[in-house]
Image: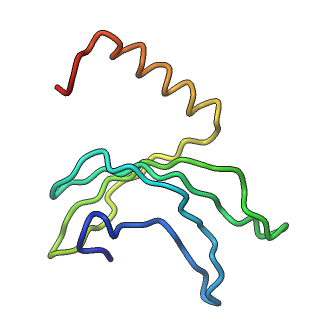
Amino acid sequence: MASKIDDITIRYEDTEGNEVVRELDKEVLSRGAWTTIMFLYEELDPRTQEFTGPKVTIRRYKKVRGDFRQQSKFNISSSKQALTIAETLKKWFSNEEGDS
């Protein structure tokens, strides 16, 4: 568990210490008792022992008794889906100015 937002990671090692999920980047979308973070990551393919192409997940965390605990997540399943989401958000918010 992480007690600070900047320490939250999705990096994961198996019981033998092998990296299974490699975090490439992250963007904190909101901070506070409820925190939202978008991660760029790769997963190890158990058959080939090579990391897959980059994937994206958006996760919500809630601070409980001093530690952030994951409450929900949304995995973007393909680059096509990621680009469609980005294009749709750009279209919906293209007339917005600044932060709301």
Closer-to-camera residue (37/25): 25
In the rendered image, which quarter contains the C terminus? top left
How many numbered markers are drawn? Answer: 0
The answer to whether residue 62 is left or right of residue 70 is: left
Q: Residue at x 43, y 54 (%)?
A: 26
Q: Residue at x 65, y 90 (%)?
A: 16
Look at 33% across and 70% down and name the residue there.
7
Q: Is residue 40 left or right of residue 54?
A: left
Residue found farthest to the right: 48
The residue at the far front in this view is 98
Q: Tell me the quarter of the picture where residue 78 sits.
A: top right
Image position of 57 with respect to 99: above or below: below
Residue 3 percent location from the top left of the image: 24, 74
Task: Using the image as rendered, state which of residue 96 and residue 48 is in the foreground.
Answer: 96
Say if 40 sits above or below 85 in the image.
Answer: below
Relative side of 100 to 43, left or right: left
User: Which quadrant would residue 35 be assigned to in this image?
Assistant: bottom left
Q: Where is the N terminus found, in terms of image quarters?
A: bottom left
Image quadrant assignment for residue 51: bottom right
As displayed, is residue 84 above or below residue 22?
Answer: above
Write the residue at 56% across / 33% down.
82
**Residue 31: image location, x then y, percent:** 21, 52
